[in-house]
Image (cartoon, rainbow, N blue to C red):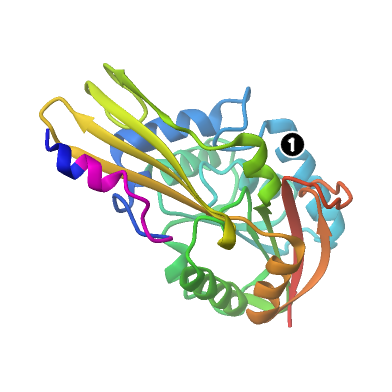
């Protein structure tokens, strides 16, 4: 084990410095993520089924969606929203950058006779044009992106929507981080979330309060001494900052909520749900 490398990795990195590339598509990690997505008892990877169902009903009603309307679900995971939307008669396309999630979603749709189009794709490379009545980006998927990536994504979504189409997303606020805090500690396991074989995990959280950014970092050391660093960046927002980014991206904010089930907005909320419209 090279202690100097470990010491360097524990130094506070510049915002949005990447860690291991595309680790959500790692065969082992993606299997752990799918388990969390499908676990109805917690909100670790996806919200609980009752919340998802409530969100789908609220979105259809609040956006005035009709059977046959075309919906794009970005970061669709194993299809928890797309399946429910398709059951309500909407034409749905799901995009995700995890082979395992797309395979699960595709098989579920086949078994339940749901006509859903799924694509394994990074939504930062989306090239669809003028196709959708609404696009969704749910459970804070906007927050891990750097400013440049967020700008690119907004451009992609703007291009993909039909004139007047809706963009619906939710983001975390500084209140969320204050409540949940940073993870700092270590543990050793025979098998775990990051690796199948024995490994040591050094967890550390870094705050960038002036920029409303925080980082959850895990340094993983395997038995043979191999070191991997996994970084989850999060950009927090308040109502004014998320509205400003959306406006700059060509959207008009129609309404702001505490979540995507229709809870009225309050200043101390942990989440902000936004319904925006393509200008």
Q: Main secondary structure of the magenta part?
A: loop
Relative to 115, is 232 on the left or the right? left
Q: Is residue 11 magenta?
A: yes
User: Does residue 217 appear in the picture of this structure?
Assistant: yes
- Is 119 a magenta residue? no
Would residue 61 appear left or right of 248 to someone viewing this image?
Answer: right
Residue at 54% across, 30% down: 38
Residue 160: percent from the left, percent from the top?
58, 75
> Which residue: 89% across, 50% down?
264
In front of the other: 138 or 109: 138
Residue 117 position within the rendered picture, expressed as x and y whole percent measured from the top left: 52, 56
Task: Determine the residue located farthest toward the right in the rendered image.
Answer: 264
Residue 50: which quarter of the image? Answer: top right
Q: Decide if residue 62 is on the left or right side of residue 142.
A: right
Q: For the magenta stretch, what is the residue range?
A: 6-15
Q: Quadrant of the N terminus?
A: top left
Q: Secondary structure at mark 1?
A: helix
Q: Is residue 7 above or below residue 251?
A: above
As drawn, 85 above or below 52? below
Task: Identify the residue under disc 1.
Answer: 51
Q: Residue at x 47, y 75 (%)?
A: 127
Pick whichever, 270 or 15, lies toward us: 15
Residue 56: x and y in percent read 75, 47
């Amino acid at each position: 084990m090279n202690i100097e490398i470990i010491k360097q990795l524990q130094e506070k990195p510049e915002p949005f410095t990447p860690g291991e590339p595309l680790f959500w598509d790692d065969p082992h990690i993606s299997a752990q993520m799918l388990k969390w997505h499908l676990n109805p008892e917690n909100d670790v990877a996806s919200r609980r089924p009752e919340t998802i169902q409530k969100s789908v009903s609220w979105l259809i009603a609040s956006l005035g969606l009709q059977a046959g309307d075309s919906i794009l679900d970005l970061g669709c995971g194993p299809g928890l929203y797309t399946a429910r939307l398709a059951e309500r008669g909407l034409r749905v396309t799901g995009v995700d950058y995890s082979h395992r999630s797309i395979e699960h979603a595709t098989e579920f749709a086949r078994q339940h006779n749901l006509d859903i189009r799924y694509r394994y794709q990074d939504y930062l490379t989306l090239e669809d044009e003028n196709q959708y009545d609404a696009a969704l980006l749910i459970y804070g998927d906007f927050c891990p992106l750097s400013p440049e990536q967020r700008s690119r994504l907004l451009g992609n979504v703007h291009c993909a929507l039909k004139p007047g189409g809706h963009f619906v997303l939710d983001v975390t606020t500084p209140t969320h981080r204050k409540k949940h805090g940073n993870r700092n500690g270590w543990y050793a396991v025979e098998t775990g979330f990051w690796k199948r074989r024995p490994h040591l995990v050094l967890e550390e959280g870094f705050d960038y309060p002036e920029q409303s950014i925080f980082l959850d970092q895990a340094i993983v050391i395997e038995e043979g001494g191999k070191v991997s660093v996994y970084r989850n960046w999060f950009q927090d927002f308040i109502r004014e900052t998320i509205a400003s980014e959306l406006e700059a991206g060509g959207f008009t904010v129609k309404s702001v909520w505490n979540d995507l089930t229709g809870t009225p907005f309050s200043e101390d909320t942990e989440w902000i749900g936004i319904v925006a419209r393509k200008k």
